Image (tube, helix red, strand yellow):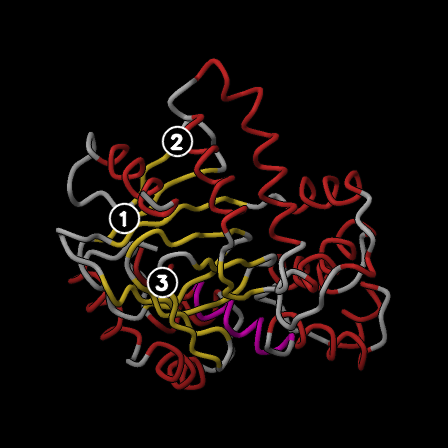
Amino acid sequence: MTLMTSLSARVLRAFATLPPEELSCPTALPWLSFIRFTHPTALNKGMLEPSMCLILQGQKKVLIGTEVVEYGAGSYLLSAIDMPVSGQVTQASADLPYLGIRIDLDLKEMADLMIDMQLDQRLIPTSGSVTYVAKSDDCLADAFLRLVTLLEHPQDLQALGQLVKKEIFYRLITAPEGGHFYQHLLSYYQGKGVSEAIQWIKANFAHPLRMDELAKTVGMSVSNLHHRFKALTVMSPLQYQKQIRLLEARRLLLSGNIDAATAAFRVGYESPSQFNREYRRSFGAPPLQDIGQLRQQGVTL
């Protein structure tokens, strides 16, 4: 039995006590959860929080910036930042459901662990964005299997769960694709740069974004901030702000009795017509039509 097969069997056992339509299964560890889909899904855009999700069975497609990536069992999607992405489960059925394991990443905890490990920065490979898809090796898969097995032994879980989590983190940042993940965590630990810019934009997305003021706030030049921001997120700060605005407007429209113009103003748009154009470009349909389709599909944001 392969590592992925063993992991799949344990995840399926966890879902056995839940209704068939349940998509997520929490565990005794608040940062660990299981995911299941019994049929393919439509392409949906959302905000991916700092996390890592390993596919055990099935296939998925994600759009990261302008890059489309398809991946399946044994591969994982990692994001070290809050990242607007589009995702779609492309292979899943009742007999062979899509199965995944997700770990939520606390960047402060991760940065502290990284410093404690005293890893030599020169040994860390480099890559591009801090949101990426990579292939798991046997060492990482084995660590996940030990972590999931610990759930069956509550007396050992609290003592050993954090140790296995630390090992998983080590495997992620020393993987061939982990270089920029390491650099981002180092920047976060030092409290400067793109991490601060992302947090500022998230907290102030409804306000005008002035690059000179943002650069001054995070202690970078405008050109360096723009270059580093785009290298890590595959979009400019203004594009990132726009995605946050549109996603929040979509959430407002879906969750309450609010019209498109009101949602537009709440998230910072001054022109309803501009909002409608950008909403359609982002989600493929005008606001009311898109929300109607989401409600028919039973989607919640």
Residue pictured at 35% horizontal, 51% vertical? 56
Residue 220: image x %, image y %?
A: 85, 70
Numbered label attached to residue 36: 1
Q: Amino acid at mark 3?
A: Gly
In this picture, residue 205 sits left or right of residue 224: left
Neighbour tally class for label 1: few under 14, some 14-19, many 20 plus, Cα within 10 Å: many
Looking at the image, residue 278 lies above or below residue 160: below
Q: Quadrant of the C terminus?
A: bottom left
Q: Secondary structure at mark 1?
A: strand
Q: Secondary structure at mark 2?
A: loop
Mark 1 or mark 3, whichever is nearer to me: 3
Residue pictured at 24% horizontal, 64% vertical? 91
Residue 247 within the magenta-colored segment of the rendering: yes
Q: Which residue is mark 2?
A: 27
Q: Are marks 2 and 3 in contact (CB under 8 Å)?
A: no
Which of the marked residues, 2 or 1, is nearer the chain's N terminus?
2
Q: Which residue is mark 3?
A: 72
Q: Amino acid at mark 1?
A: Arg
Magenta stretch, overall SS? helix
Cα–Cα gap, marks 2 and 1: 14 Å
Q: Are marks 2 and 1 in contact (CB under 8 Å)?
A: no
Residue 222 within the magenta-colored segment of the rendering: no
Residue 30: image x %, image y %?
A: 47, 32
